[in-house]
Image (cartoon, rainbow, N blue to C red):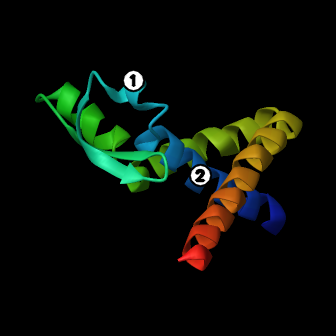
Amino acid sequence: LNWSDLLLLGIATHKLSRVVTKDLVTSPFRAPFVKFKKSAGAGEVEEEARGEGIQEAVGDLITCPYCMAPWLASALVFGFQRAPRTTRVLSGIFCITAASDFLNQLYVKAKE
């Protein structure tokens, strides 16, 4: 992987880990393993693991973007090795979305 690929995959991993672990839209997939705590703003929610054993372990994993990132990064690198064009396009989408999120947050701050 060259530096531009590492940057692309790094930003995509960041955004994808936020989508998987915090996004309101993906909360139904996390629901069997977590309980809702509160809205975190900007389309994100705060949740905590529930249950015990495997249920709690999965809940801990899928509510922690730092814990999920290595797994998602591994999947992206594997995808990049097997299907570089497709992985680059999908990573580009998440990278652009991350940039848009950042600009939206700046816009909100600028309006205050």
Residue 27 place in picture, x, y as percent: 40, 31
Q: Do tag 1 and tag 2 residues touch (Cβ < 8 Å)?
A: no
Establish if 18 lies above or below 102.
above
Residue designated by label 2: 15
Position of 91 compared to 10: left or right? Answer: right
* Residue at the spot 59% in from the left edge and 74% down from the top edge: 111
Q: Looking at the rendering, which quadrant does residue 63 occupy?
A: top left
Establish if 16 lies above or below 56.
below
> In terms of sequence position, does the residue under pointer 1 or pointer 2 come before the other?
2
- Which mark identifies residue 38? none
Could you say which is closer to the camera, residue 58 or residue 23?
A: 23
Which mark's residue is nearer the viewer, 1 or 2?
1
Give the residue furthest to the left: 52
* Residue at the spot 26% in from the left edge and 27% down from the top edge: 33
Residue 98 in sight: yes
* Residue at the spot 64% in from the left edge and 70% down from the top edge: 107
* Residue at the spot 27% in from the left edge and 21% down from the top edge: 32
Q: Secondary structure at mark 1?
A: helix
Give the residue furthest to the front: 112
Establish if 40 lies above or below 28.
below
Q: Residues within 10 Å of mark 2 (few under 14, many from 20)?
A: many
- Amino acid at the residue labelled 2: Lys
Residue 80 place in picture, x, y as percent: 77, 41
- Amino acid at the residue labelled 1: Pro
In the rendered image, the quadrant that contains the N terminus is bottom right
Q: CA distance from mark 1 to mark 2?
A: 19 Å
Residue designated by label 1: 28
Residue 2 in sight: no
Q: Residues within 10 Å of mark 1 (few under 14, many from 20)?
A: few
